[in-house]
Each structure stands twice: as structure tokens, then as C-alpha cells.
């Protein structure tokens, strides 16, 4: 489904990074190693690399990865790309200072729990998770994101799932998004910034 959606010359989510990542760019520093989870067409991994982060990106869609490679080349940055399903991906233990998980709400709760645990494990001690997605209120807006309400995040869900991390920021809010055709219009969003204890 996703690969077919990306089978177009257009960038479905645009070439500009997610507004959330721009808002939290202070975490993206040279010398840091970052993982962009289900990175799609590369808008977020390219931004991380442009900020000097040594960046690895993974996604299951070959069409998305081809576009992500083209975007990295266009911006003259280096990103290491991996084509893999999120469930089969070889998550490196304590490998990353930054994990960016932006609009990865394609997972049903059981699989999501597994992936959240892997994201925690792949953070180095002191590493930071930057997670962004939609809340259940997004169902009413219909401006992007999954239709399955159980895939969406609440503050309670994230606080519970990432209880072993130090929550730096957790907030839900509404904002107008203009991120390609994929995310366009008034949106019900949630941000989490959480640090793994040293
Ligand atoms: C809503 S898009 C977000 C892409 C990117 N994070 C962004 O913000 O532009 C969801 C992404 O998840 C990827 N995806 C869907 N199922 C996946 C899976 N099982 N394993 C890895 N990636 C998957 C899709 O290919 C797509 O790129």
C-alpha cells in the first residue's frame, strides 16, 4: 500500500521536514548519531543530516527510499538508508543519540508495543526520543493519518509506554499542517521528547 502511494514523482509529504522536527532542532547536533524510523521519502533524515547528525534512515518502501536517496543527493548530505520492515529491522542495541519517530502510526497496538521497546533499546544512555503523531481527535479532522483510532496516541498511552524514559516534553495540541498532500490542514497532534536515563 505504502510503496504504491509513493510511486509518483511528487513527494507525498513534501521535501521540508516535519514542523515538529524543526521545532525541536536544538536536539540535532553535529557528532550525534540519529535514526529516522519509517522515514519515508527522506524529508526528516535529510534535515537531521543537514544539522550535522550522522543519520541512518529505515523504511519498508523501496519507492520511498529511492526518493529519500535522491533528496539526500539533491541536498548534498549523506544518509545511510535501510530497506526493512520495522518488525524485521536489525535494531542496534544502544546505537543512537537520537531516535526520530515521526508519523509511524501504521502499527496496531501489539506491534506498536514491540517497536516502542526496540526504540528504547536502540537509544544510548542519555539518548533522546523525538516522537510525533496524531491523537484520536484527528479522526474528526480527516487531514491525514490512519483511520484506526487504536493506532493513535494519547498522552496517557505515551506516558505509560515510555515510563522508563525521562519525559522532557509531552503535549497534545491542534495545528495547521502543510506537509505535502499527505498531511494537509487542521490536525490533532501529539509530541513526545524523552531521554533515556544515563
Ligand atoms: C505517514 S508515512 C511517514 C513517513 C515519514 N516518517 C515522514 O514523516 O515523512 C509512514 C511511513 O511508514 C512506512 N511504513 C509503513 N509500514 C512500515 C513497516 N511495516 N515497516 C517500515 N516502514 C513502514 C511507509 O513506507 C511510510 O514511509
Image: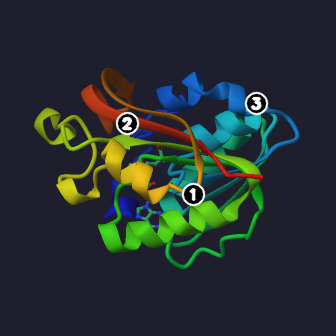
Assign a secondary structure to mark 2: strand
Is residue 104 among what the camera can see?
Answer: no
* Circle number at residue 190: 2
Residue beneath disc 3:
51
Q: Does residue 134 appear to the left or right of 65 in the view shown?
A: left
Q: Of circles 1 and 2, which is in front?
A: 1
Q: Does residue 162 appear to the left or right of 152 in the view shown?
A: right
What residue lies at 34% left-to-right and 54% top-to-bottom? 5
Quarter containing ligand 1?
bottom left
x and y percentages locating residue 109 in the rendered image:
31, 67
* Circle number at residue 164: 1
Q: Is residue 150 above or below residue 129?
A: below
Q: Of circles 1 and 3, which is in front?
A: 1
x and y percentages locating residue 84 in the rendered image:
56, 72
Q: Of circles 3 and 2, which is in front?
A: 2
Q: Nearer the viewer, residue 98 or 168?
A: 168
Assign a secondary structure to mark 1: loop
Disc 1 packing (10 Å; few <14; some 14–19; many ≥20): few
Disc 3 packing (10 Å; few <14; some 14–19; many ≥20): some
Q: Is residue 146 above or below residue 62?
A: above
Q: Are the residues flagged by discs 1 and 2 in contact, CB closer than 8 Å? A: no
Q: Quadrant of residue 151?
A: bottom left
Looking at marks 1 and 2 on the same chain, the residue that comes earlier in the sequence is marked by 1
x and y percentages locating residue 55 in the rendered image:
74, 49
Amino acid at each position: 500500500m505504502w510503496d504504491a502511494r509513493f510511486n509518483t514523482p511528487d513527494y507525498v509529504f513534501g521535501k521540508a521536514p516535519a514542523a515538529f522536527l524543526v521545532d525541536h532542532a536544538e536536539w540535532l547536533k553535529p557528532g550525534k548519531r540519529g535514526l529516522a524510523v519509517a522515514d519515508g521519502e527522506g524529508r526528516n533524515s535529510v534535515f537531521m543530516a543537514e544539522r550535522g547528525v550522522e543519520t541512518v534512515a529505515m523504511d519498508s518502501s523501496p519507492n520511498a527510499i529511492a526518493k529519500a536517496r535522491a533528496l539526500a543527493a539533491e541536498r548534498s548530505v549523506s544518509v545511510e538508508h535501510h530497506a526493512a520492515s520495522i518488525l524485521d529491522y536489525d535494531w542496534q542495541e544502544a546505537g543512537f543519540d537520537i531516535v526520530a519517530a515521526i508519523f509511524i502510526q501504521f502499527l496496531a497496538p501489539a506491534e506498536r508495543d514491540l517497536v516502542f521497546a526496540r526504540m528504547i533499546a536502540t537509544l544510548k544512555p542519555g539518548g533522546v526520543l523525538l516522537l510525533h503523531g496524531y491523537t484520536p481527535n484527528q479522526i474528526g479532522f480527516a487531514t491525514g493519518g490512519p483511520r484506526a483510532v487504536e493506532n493513535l496516541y494519547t498522552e496517557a498511552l505515551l506516558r505509560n509506554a515510555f515510563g522508563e524514559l525521562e519525559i522532557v516534553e509531552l503535549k497534545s495540541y491542534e495545528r495547521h499542517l502543510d506537509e505535502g498532500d499527505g498531511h494537509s490542514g487542521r490536525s490533532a497532534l501529539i509530541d513526545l521528547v524523552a531521554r533515556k536515563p544515563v
